[in-house]
Image: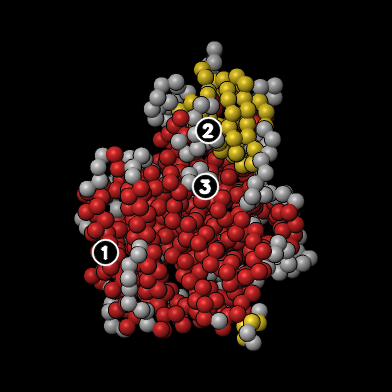
């Protein structure tokens, strides 16, 4: 891999090297799992379903990921790993989530969520020790919340009290922690001051083997509806001593560190879950193509055909938004706070809705827990967990709401558009700038890109005219939102805002999704991917987003639906992914 300085001097070479590495790594993970429909495959769908029924994470799946050294993808290159681009990590992890959300969370994403705190503010020694642990195949876990306080983690009661002679005494409990019983390293969000306010908490990084077993225990495992195989349990401490070197960053910096870390994890994890949506759509298409009903295949039934195409478009919308969110971490780190929350809020929501619609196509097969289509019900149960994690939907909206008035005043219709590279899936990027993430900026290049696109969109063909018209409607929606945001009362600019403010935040995320779709299509024009270069998908995606906003729209040209349907079938028959990358798959 080229150094950052060399890459800047030779951007074409950097692009080729980074893209070659990313696509090869994603393929290595995908084909390392083998054919999901092979009954003899120890990590095929049948065996994954057996592990789920037994409420266990797939041991064979973990062995595969051990052999593929997946943990290296969570460690920055400077410490011996592969992590340099957040969008590449999402692309790699998508292959794991395509097979099993339990493996995606239980083996990988949880360690990444914990590690981000250390990469963001840890000491050099903490970074090197955690890198060594992960590269050796170890696991890390993170504990922010407590059941009594939910997402309001500033009210957490778990304490790290000053100890005589230095260090801390840990006292209290943490609940619903993934891998609490088997993680070698633990990142704990802890109260280090009894005073109210944001400076009362800190983050500590602990090694399990350094804890006094007489003052520390793992609580019984929870029984879960989804991700049954994940080891969800809790931790209990009784004045357990830990050294002062466990502190990550500065004392009292915990809230700021958590919010900065969330900007990375909220941007990344929803994009990983697109793999689950991809697998679910593929399962439904497989059923529709092979199932006969009323003397023809289910795929020929207009409602089923339209539903499958709509789910494909939803995946493209989600991936466009995920792409903009992850690349913004590199290109617009000062603006990432609002984008990360928007991605974490809207992408799981759209994916869950698409899964519900696909379940209707499967009909009674949706309820079958084994067999050829049994994996679908597991994906449906597992996916909603990603809407919770370290921040539920309301918490993400509560992060957006206080920023709306500032954005309306300073950014919308006044800011500079985001750079074109934000919307280019294969364009080169520098390393993740952990030290440049801020809590709020008052800038919004993504929305500015929507405004800029309106004046530059072609309007020659009927499809282009439809796309241009929908973009205009989105711009009008943003202008109306601007007026409403500027009129918000002081109370409605806080997490205790009225439902109207939460609805405003919802509408804003939809506009960011529309801006992402337009940006991706504009950058794809004239490129090698004929489908992404076609305005049909972008026009239909904006149509869906405008309908989501409650707008009444003229009908799309018939050619749009046909073009999208053709692509659904092509990617199914050629075993290609249903995302922006059109990547080769095992099956």
Residue at mark 1 to residue at mark 3: CA–CA distance: 31 Å
Quadrant of the rendered structure where residue 515 is? bottom left
Mark 2 and mark 1 residues within 8 Å of each other at the beta carbon: no
Spot occupied by residue 348 in the image (x, y as percentages of width and height) = 49, 56
Looking at the rendered structure, the secondary structure element under dot 2 is loop
Q: Residue furthest top?
A: 164
Mark 1 and mark 3 residues within 8 Å of each other at the beta carbon: no
Spot occupied by residue 500 in the image (x, y as percentages of width and height) = 32, 50
Looking at the rendered structure, the secondary structure element under dot 3 is loop
Point out which mark residue 388 bears: 3
Residue at mark 3 to residue at mark 2: CA–CA distance: 16 Å
Residue at mark 2 to residue at mark 1: CA–CA distance: 42 Å
- Res. 75 in view: no
Q: Earlier in the sequence, mark 2 or mark 1?
A: 2
Measured along the vertical axis of the image, is residue 137 above or below residue 290?
A: above
Q: Residue at x 40, y 69 (%)?
A: 544
Answer left or right for 452 relative to 364.
left
Observer-nearest residue: 235 or 368?
A: 368
Point out which mark residue 148 bears: 2
Q: Residue at x 52, y 59 (%)?
A: 352
Residue position marked by numbered label 1 in the rendering: 475
Mark 3 is surrounded, within 10 Å at the Cα level, by few (under 14), some (14 to 19) or many (20 or more) other residues, namely: some
Q: Which quadrant: the C terminus?
A: bottom right
Looking at the rendered structure, the secondary structure element under dot 1 is helix
């Amino acid at each position: 891999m080229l150094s950052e300085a060399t890459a800047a001097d030779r951007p074409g070479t950097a692009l080729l090297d980074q893209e070659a590495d990313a696509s090869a790594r994603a393929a290595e993970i995908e084909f390392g799992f083998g054919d999901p429909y092979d009954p003899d495959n120890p990590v095929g769908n049948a065996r994954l379903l057996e592990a789920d029924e037994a409420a266990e994470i797939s041991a064979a799946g973990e062995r595969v990921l051990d052999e593929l050294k997946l943990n290296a993808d969570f460690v920055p290159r400077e410490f011996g790993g592969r992590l340099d681009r957040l969008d590449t990590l999402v692309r790699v992890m998508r292959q794991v989530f395509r097979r099993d959300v339990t493996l995606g969370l239980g083996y990988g994403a949880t360690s990444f969520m914990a590690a981000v705190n250390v990469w963001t503010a840890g000491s050099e020694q903490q970074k090197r020790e955690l890198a060594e642990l992960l590269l050796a195949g170890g696991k890390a876990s993170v504990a922010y919340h407590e059941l009594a306080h939910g997402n309001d983690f500033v009210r957490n009661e778990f304490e790290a009290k000053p100890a005589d002679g230095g260090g801390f005494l840990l006292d209290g409990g943490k609940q619903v922690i993934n891998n609490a019983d088997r993680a070698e390293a633990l990142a704990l969000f802890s109260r280090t001051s009894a005073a109210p306010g944001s400076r009362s908490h800190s983050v500590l990084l602990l090694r399990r083997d350094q804890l006094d077993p007489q003052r520390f225990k793992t609580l019984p495992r929870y029984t879960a509806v989804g991700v049954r195989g994940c080891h969800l349990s809790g931790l209990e401490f009784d004045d357990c001593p830990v050294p002062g070197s466990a502190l990550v960053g500065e004392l009292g910096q915990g809230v700021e560190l958590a919010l900065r870390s969330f900007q990375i994890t909220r941007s990344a994890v929803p994009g990983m879950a697109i793999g689950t949506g991809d697998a679910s759509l593929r399962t439904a298409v497989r059923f529709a193509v092979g199932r006969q009903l009323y003397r023809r295949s289910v795929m020929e039934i207009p409602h089923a055909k339209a539903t499958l195409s709509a789910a494909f478009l939803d995946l493209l919308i989600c991936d466009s938004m995920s792409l903009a969110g992850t690349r913004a971490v590199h290109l617009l780190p000062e603006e990432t706070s609002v984008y990360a929350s928007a991605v974490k809020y809207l992408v799981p929501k759209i994916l869950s809705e698409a899964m519900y619609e696909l379940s209707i196509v499967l009909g009674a097969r949706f309820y079958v827990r084994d067999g050829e289509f049994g994996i679908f019900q597991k994906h449906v149960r597992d996916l909603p967990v990603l809407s919770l994690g370290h921040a539920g939907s309301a918490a993400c909206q509560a992060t957006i709401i206080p920023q709306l008035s500032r954005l309306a005043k300073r950014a919308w219709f006044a800011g500079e558009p985001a750079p074109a590279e934000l919307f280019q899936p294969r364009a080169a990027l520098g390393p993740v700038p952990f030290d440049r993430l801020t809590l709020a900026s008052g800038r919004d290049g993504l929305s500015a890109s929507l405004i800029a696109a309106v004046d530059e969109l072609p309007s020659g063909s009927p499809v282009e005219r439809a796309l241009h018209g929908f973009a205009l409607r989105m711009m009008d929606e943003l202008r109306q939102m601007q007026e409403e945001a500027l009129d918000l009362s002081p109370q409605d600019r806080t997490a205790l805002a009225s439902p109207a403010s939460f609805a405003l935040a919802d509408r804003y995320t939809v506009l960011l999704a529309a801006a992402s779709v337009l940006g991706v299509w504009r950058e794809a024009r004239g490129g090698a991917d004929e489908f992404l270069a076609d305005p049909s998908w972008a026009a239909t995606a904006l149509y869906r987003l405008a309908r989501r906003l409650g707008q009444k729209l003229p009908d799309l040209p018939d050619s749009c639906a046909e073009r999208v349907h053709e692509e659904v079938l092509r990617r199914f028959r050629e075993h290609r992914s249903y995302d922006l990358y059109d990547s080769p798959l095992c099956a």
